[in-house]
Structure formats: structure tokens, C-alpha cells
């Protein structure tokens, strides 16, 4: 039986996509091989990479002077790739709004002066600092943000307007909200939240910014090299890219990013409304900054939280345990989570509240 999977990542994928992948697993595109066996230089596979790229361009309205590449190593590797490609003057600003933002900032310190210009740890990362009031360094090579904070359930509602190129880790929200790509220097996202199985990371970068990576930048982390080779510089994570392509086709068929955004607003709105009106559950995030992808909540009683997670699992609602830094529960409701899944969760929450009042 398929369950409703609320995991923060790797996370649920569209059922139709899984079925399609299953159906063509043994014979991909008439090759008599699976996509995991085929040469990455084979035309049939190259077509997959090109389609994934063009769908990304189409769905996010990526300007032509931006590279769209698929690389390995997860978003965490990009924490290093960002300074290695961009930190020419040896200085960058970081806004620390959660655990991954902090890791990105710490990685930046390996390569230069990574300045923390914003930090919301004073209130357990339950808000986003006012981006209009930050002290941006006039000589920063870039400003790094984490647009959606997966663990703490916050997101930027307004992006910084700064002189330096804006770099955004969008791992847990890419393709769920309409963005103006031209406002960013670089956007990157690990696939395993909203796009595909783990193994591939998407990088969208303004080409004029990536022409001269630092001398010490490993070849594999040079976005320019990946761009010039159409993401086929070395053996790519073929299966993950193939799945990303199927998911992007699915997103397009369902009405594109606008429709995904409306669905996410609807699902998260339903859940937050229920939480705010209940006596048992609480979400501590400042309402304005609430994520529409990751919804953490607590009962205030650790034992009751554990009971909730265990009983929800019995009811076919899995991976609801919150991150160890926050505790309680977290429902990750990415693009592939149907509204029915969120409705089922709310019904379960009602029942649990009645039984444990
Ligand atoms: C999951 C996540 C990461 C880490 O991704 P990996 O692919 O595991 O390296 C980084 N940033 C954000 C916002 C995430 O949600």
C-alpha cells in the first residue's frame, strides 16, 4: 500500500512519474536497456538532459544568458562551489536563517571572509531578518540566502535588494513558487526535496558571473566547465536526471510553477488554519514567514509528540517526526504531495486531539 510520505527529503514523488519510470525501466526509449545502463553519450540519454534543461528554462522563465546545469554532490557541495566560483575579492555576505544557511556560511569561511550580516538564531530561526535593514558589505562578491528553511519552516517573502549578486539555496522550494530569475546571480537546489531522487543538484547561474572561477576551484566544481559541456563533462547521475525530466514534464502538465504555487498555498493554508484553531497543536513561526513547503508543529509535550508520530505511521501518514533541532512534528508538503494527503493528515490530527485532550 502507498502511504502519504511527509519526509523532508528524500521525499515523495508523483505516483504517475514512478509508474512511468517503472513501465520503461527495462527498455528505455526503445534501446533495450534501462536508463541506468545506457552510455551517457548515447543520443537517447543526451536528449533527456537537454529536455530537463529546456523544461527548467521554460518553467522558471530562465533568461538566455543564464546557464542551467545538473551536477553531483548535493546542495552541500554547492556551499563550497559558490565561493570557489564567485569569491574573487575574498568577501561575501551571508544571511543565516537556519541550519543549512549556517553550513553554507561556515563553508564560505574556508575560502575567504564570509560575513554574517543577518541571523535569526535568537528566536530559534522562527523568522527572516528584515532584508531592508541589513548592513550589506559594499565590497561583497555576493550575498547568500537560503530562500526556504527546510528544518525551521520559514521562507523569504521578500528577497534582498543589494548591489552584489544574490545567491540562493532553493533546495526545498524550487518549482513551487514563481521567481524572477534575473534578480539572482545564482540559484541552486538539491533535487531530493521537490524534483527528483537524490543525486543531482540543479544550478542556474548568470553566465557573465561564472567565467573565471578561483584558481583553486576543482574542475568538477567549475560551473563554467559544466555549462560548456552541457552537464556531460563526466558521467552524470543519469537516473536522477531522467527522473527530474519526468517530474518536470509532470509539473508542466499540471499547469507549471504557477499551479504548483497555488496548490502549495492551498495545502499549507489548510494545515496552518487547522493548527492555529486547534488547542493541541502549535506552530511557532512568525505567520508572515511561514513556509508553504515545510510545516513544523508541536503539542508541547515530547511524549505526546512521539505518540503522534507513531500512531500517524500506523494510519499511513509517515515521516512526520520533526528534525532533531526542533523536535515535535514536521509535515513536508512538496509539489508531489496531493491535497488529499494533507486532508488525511488534518483528519488524523483532529482524531488524535479528541483522543488525547
Ligand atoms: C536538504 C537541504 C540541503 C542539503 O542538501 P544535500 O543535497 O543533502 O547536500 C541544503 N539546503 C537546503 C535548503 C536543504 O533543504
Image: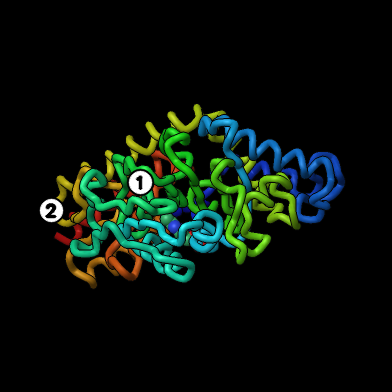
Q: What residue is at 19 percent from the left and 56 percent from the top? A: 284
Residue 173 seen from this side? yes
The disc at residue 104 is: none
235 or 16: nearer the viewer = 235
Residue drawn at point x = 29 percent, y = 69 percent: 306
Sequence-wise, the earlier of marks 1 and 2 is 2
Q: Position of residue 322 (x, y in %)?
A: 33, 63
Colouring mode (rainbow / by chain / secondary structure / one colour): rainbow
> What residue does disc 2 label?
279
Instruction: State the residue position of label 1.
Output: 344
Quarter of the rendering containing residue 152: bottom left
Residue at image position (34%, 62%) is 115
Whether residue 181 is situated above or below residue 348 in the rendered picture: above
Tell me if I can see residue 350 in this picture: no
Name the side, left or right, on which 280 lies relative to 154. left
Q: Nearer the viewer, residue 257 or 32?
A: 257
- Say above or below: 200 vs 18: below
Return the x and y of residue 134 as percentages of the image width and height.
Answer: 24, 51
Q: Is residue 47 above or below residue 128?
A: above
Q: Is residue 328 left or right of residue 23?
A: left
Amino acid at each position: 500500500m502507498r502511504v502519504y510520505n511527509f519526509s523532508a527529503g528524500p521525499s515523495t514523488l508523483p505516483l504517475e512519474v514512478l509508474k512511468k519510470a517503472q513501465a520503461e525501466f527495462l527498455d528505455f526509449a526503445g534501446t533495450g536497456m534501462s536508463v541506468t545502463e545506457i552510455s551517457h553519450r548515447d543520443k537517447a540519454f543526451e536528449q533527456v538532459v537537454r529536455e530537463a534543461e529546456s523544461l527548467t528554462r521554460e518553467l522558471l522563465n530562465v533568461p538566455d544568458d543564464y546557464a542551467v546545469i545538473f551536477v553531483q554532490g548535493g546542495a552541500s557541495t554547492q556551499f563550497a562551489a559558490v565561493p570557489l566560483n564567485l569569491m574573487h575579492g575574498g568577501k561575501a555576505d551571508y544571511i543565516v536563517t537556519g541550519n543549512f544557511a549556517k553550513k553554507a556560511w561556515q563553508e564560505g569561511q574556508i575560502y575567504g571572509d564570509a560575513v554574517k550580516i543577518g541571523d535569526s538564531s535568537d528566536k530559534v530561526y522562527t523568522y527572516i531578518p528584515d532584508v531592508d535593514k541589513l548592513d550589506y558589505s559594499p565590497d561583497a562578491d555576493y550575498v547568500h540566502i537560503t530562500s526556504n528553511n527546510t528544518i525551521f519552516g520559514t521562507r523569504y517573502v521578500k528577497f534582498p535588494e543589494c548591489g552584489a549578486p544574490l545567491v540562493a539555496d532553493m533546495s526545498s522550494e524550487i518549482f513551487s513558487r514563481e521567481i524572477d530569475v534575473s534578480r539572482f546571480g545564482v540559484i541552486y537546489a538539491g533535487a531530493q526535496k521537490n524534483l527528483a531522487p537524490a543525486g543531482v543538484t540543479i544550478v542556474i547561474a548568470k553566465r557573465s558571473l561564472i567565467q573565471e572561477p578561483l584558481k583553486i576551484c576543482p574542475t568538477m566544481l567549475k560551473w563554467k566547465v559544466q555549462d560548456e559541456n552541457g552537464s556531460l563533462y563526466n558521467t552524470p547521475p543519469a537516473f536522477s536526471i531522467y527522473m527530474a525530466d519526468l517530474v518536470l514534464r509532470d509539473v508542466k502538465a499540471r499547469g507549471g510553477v504557477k499551479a504548483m504555487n497555488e496548490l502549495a498555498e492551498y495545502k499549507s493554508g489548510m494545515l496552518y488554519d487547522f493548527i492555529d484553531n486547534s488547542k493541541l497543536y502549535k506552530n511557532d513561526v512568525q505567520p508572515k514567514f511561514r513556509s508553504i513547503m515545510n510545516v513544523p508543529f508541536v503539542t508541547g509535550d515530547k511524549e505526546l509528540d512521539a505518540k503522534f508520530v507513531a500512531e500517524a505511521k500506523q494510519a499511513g501518514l509517515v515521516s512526520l517526526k520533526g528534525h532533531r533541532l526542533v523536535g515535535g512534528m514536521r509535515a513536508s508538503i512538496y509539489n508531489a504531495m496531493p491535497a488529499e494527503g494533507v486532508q488525511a493528515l488534518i483528519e488524523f490530527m483532529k482524531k488524535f486531539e479528541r483522543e488525547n485532550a
